[in-house]
Image (cartoon, grey):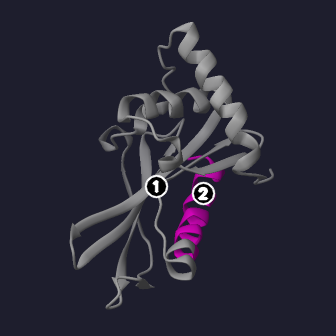
Amino acid sequence: MHLFAENLAVEISSYYRNLALAHGVIPKVFTLVNAEGDQYLFFIDDLRMEQDEETQFLAFIVQQHDAVCYARGTLVILEKSQQLIEFAVIDKEDQEAIVCSAEITRDMDEKPIGLSEFEKTLAPKKTIFFSGLFEPPRLSEDKAEEFESLWDEMKPKILHRSMGI
């Protein structure tokens, strides 16, 4: 497993802890890291796309940046009283994914007030429903241009940093 994948798991845990406890929000998050250590992170809900188009777009940017790993996270509601933040880190070269999960505690106003430690496990990559983003998407020329234009518009507004090598 690439060192960036391990670091991404730790970082996304901290990121979600801060978002949930300090800001009271738990967005769907996507991030990728390329071999040079460039990381891009954004909220998936901001895309406002249908599931299939969203998957194609995410695969497009994974390809555009020659990502070595990526992560996707979300809020999972099992019951009103049992909610989790879950994310998975997918490494290009590894057959296992890092899956992390933490339970949320909410107050009477439904504001997040507690978050357990993220439990980290390994799972076969093929069992993660969004693990196929390293496969180049089949896009028409118009769709590829549309995605490229959207990505160019998004990049200045999203978190971009270097993880360093």
Q: Which residues are magenta?
A: 1-18
Instruction: Find the residue positioned furthest to the left.
Output: 79
The mark found on residue 28 in the picture is 1
C-beta proximity under 8 Å, tags 1 and 2: no
Residue closer to the observer: 18 or 90: 18
Identify the secondary structure beneath mark 2.
helix
Q: Amino acid at mark 2?
A: Leu
Q: Whole-percent x and y of residue 7?
A: 63, 59
Residue at 44% across, 79% down: 117
Residue at 38% across, 34% down: 50
Q: Whole-percent x and y of residue 160?
A: 74, 50
Which residue lies under the disc numbered 2?
A: 8
Q: Vertically, is 25 above or below 33?
A: below
Q: Vertically, is 135 above or below 83?
A: above
Q: Vertically, is 90 above or below 56?
A: below
Residue closer to the observer: 104 or 143: 143
**Residue 63 appears in which quarter of the rendering?**
top right
Instruction: Find the residue positioned furthest to the bottom.
Output: 108
Q: Amino acid at mark 1?
A: Lys
The secondary structure that most of the magenta stretch takes on is helix
- The reply to whether the magenta stretch includes residue 51 is no
- Which label's residue is closer to the chain start, 1 or 2? 2
The mark found on residue 76 in the picture is none
Identify the secondary structure beneath mark 1.
loop
Q: Whole-percent x and y of residue 155?
A: 72, 41
Residue 12 visible to an observer of this rendering? yes
Give the crowd class for mark 2: few <14, some 14-19, many >=20 residues within 10 Å: many
- Marks 1 and 2 sit apart, C-alpha to C-alpha, by 16 Å
